[in-house]
Image (cartoon, rainbow, N blue to C red):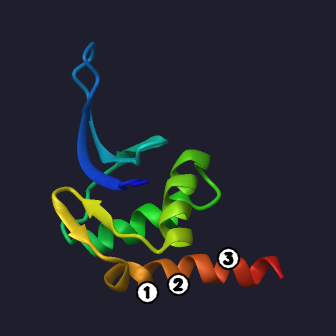
């Protein structure tokens, strides 16, 4: 059973007013979420992942669930069209998720 996680940089446009906002869509085969209130989007993929994790923990249950799946299964993630294996992204997840786990104890 495969479950691929994606983070996609996105420009959101209000079709009525034409107002534009920046953000990301985060999704896998089962859940989806987005954030559309950023002033800028990091150009570095790993900085983007860090920002998504920082925003997702305790704020958005869908995004947290998608990123929790990556952490729990130690799976890779696609950021736009680039795949990052667990070994590359693990330190980013460890910083936030392991700190969160230790606070629960």
Q: Residue at x 41, y 53 (%)?
A: 3
Q: Which residue is mark 1?
A: 91
Give the distance between the C-alpha atoms of the residues marked 3 and 2, in whole angstroms: 9 Å
Q: Are the residues at dot 3 and dot 2 in contact (C-beta closer than 8 Å)? A: no
Q: Secondary structure at mark 2?
A: helix
Q: Is residue 49 left or right of residue 84?
A: right
Q: Is residue 99 left or right of residue 90?
A: right
Q: Secondary structure at mark 3?
A: helix
Vertical relation: 14 (above or below) 52: above
Residue reaching furthest to the front: 1
Q: Which residue is mark 2?
A: 95
Mark 1 is surrounded, within 10 Å at the Cα level, by few (under 14), some (14 to 19) or many (20 or more) other residues, namely few
Q: Residue at x 21, y 22 (%)?
A: 18
Mark 3 is surrounded, within 10 Å at the Cα level, by few (under 14), some (14 to 19) or many (20 or more) other residues, namely few
Return the disc, 3 or 1, that comes first in the chain's sequence: 1
Q: Are the residues at dot 1 and dot 2 in contact (C-beta closer than 8 Å)? A: yes
The image position of residue 102, as x and y in percent, is 73, 84
Q: Quadrant of the N terminus?
A: bottom left
Q: Quadrant of residue 48?
A: bottom left
Q: Residue at x 29, y 23 (%)?
A: 14
Closest to the observer: 39 or 63?
A: 63
Q: Which residue is mark 3?
A: 100
Q: Are the residues at dot 3 and dot 1 in contact (C-beta closer than 8 Å)? A: no
Return the disc, 3 or 2, that comes first in the chain's sequence: 2
Give the distance between the C-alpha atoms of the residues marked 3 and 1, in whole angstroms: 14 Å
Q: Secondary structure at mark 1?
A: helix
Q: Is residue 34 left or right of residue 69?
A: left
Residue reaching furthest to the top: 16
């Amino acid at each position: 059973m495969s479950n691929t996680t994606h983070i996609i940089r996105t420009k959101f446009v209000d079709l009525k007013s034409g107002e534009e906002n920046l953000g990301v869509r985060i999704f896998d085969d089962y859940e989806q979420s987005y954030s559309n209130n950023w002033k800028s989007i990091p150009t570095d993929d790993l900085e983007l992942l860090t920002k998504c994790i920082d925003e997702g923990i305790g704020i958005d249950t869908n995004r947290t669930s998608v990123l929790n799946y990556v952490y729990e299964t130690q799976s890779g993630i696609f950021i736009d069209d680039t795949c990052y294996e667990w070994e590359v992204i693990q330190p980013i997840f460890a910083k936030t998720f392991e700190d969160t786990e230790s606070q629960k104890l």
